[in-house]
Image (spheres, rainbow, N blue to C red):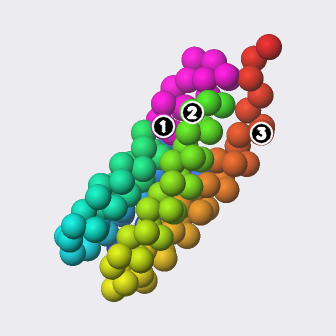
Amino acid sequence: MVVDRQSSDFDLEKRTAAFGESVIEFCQTVGRTAITKPLISQLVRSACRVGANYCEADESATKREFRYRISLCRREARETKHWLRMLVAASKESAETARVLWKEADELTRIFAAIYPNSFPES
C-alpha cells in the first residue's frame, strides 16, 4: 500500500495517478460505517482530483490556465490531507497506512506550492 515513487518521482502525472490508486486501495480496506462512508467518499474524490487536475494543467493552452490548474492540484492535495486525518479519527486502525498517504499528499502539496509562484500568468 506504499506509493511507488522510485520510478515516478519526477513524473507528476504518474506520481499523482499512483497516489490516487493508493488511496483507492486504502479506502477499500477501511470498514464501512455511517461515519466512515462519507469520509471515504470525500477522500477518494479529493485524492483522484489531484491527478485529474494535473492532467488538465499539463494540457493547458495558456500560462494562466496552467497556473489555475496547479492551484487546484495544491488545494486538492491539502484537502486530501484533511480527509485522511478525519478518517483516522473515525477508524483508528487505519492510522499507519493513512500516515504514509498523508506524507505523500503533503509532498505533493509542497511540490504544487513550489510550481505555482513560478508559473506566471500571461499579461
Disc number at residue 117?
A: 3
| Depth order, front residue of 29/13 | 29
The percent position of residue 15, horizontal first and vertical second, equals: 48, 54
Q: Which quadrant is home to the N terminus?
A: bottom left
* Residue in front for this viewpoint, 35 or 95: 35
Quadrant where the C terminus lies? top right
What residue did someone put label 2 on?
Answer: 69
63 in magenta = yes
In what element is the residue under mark 2?
helix
Depicted 64 relative to depicted 40: above or below: above
Q: Is residue 119 left or right of residue 33?
A: right
Tell me the SS state at disc 1. helix
Which mark is first along the chain, 3 or 1? Answer: 1
For mark 1, what is the residue? 53
Q: Amino acid at mark 2?
A: Arg
Marks 1 & 2, CB-CB < 8 Å contact: yes
Residue at 56% x, 39% y is 72
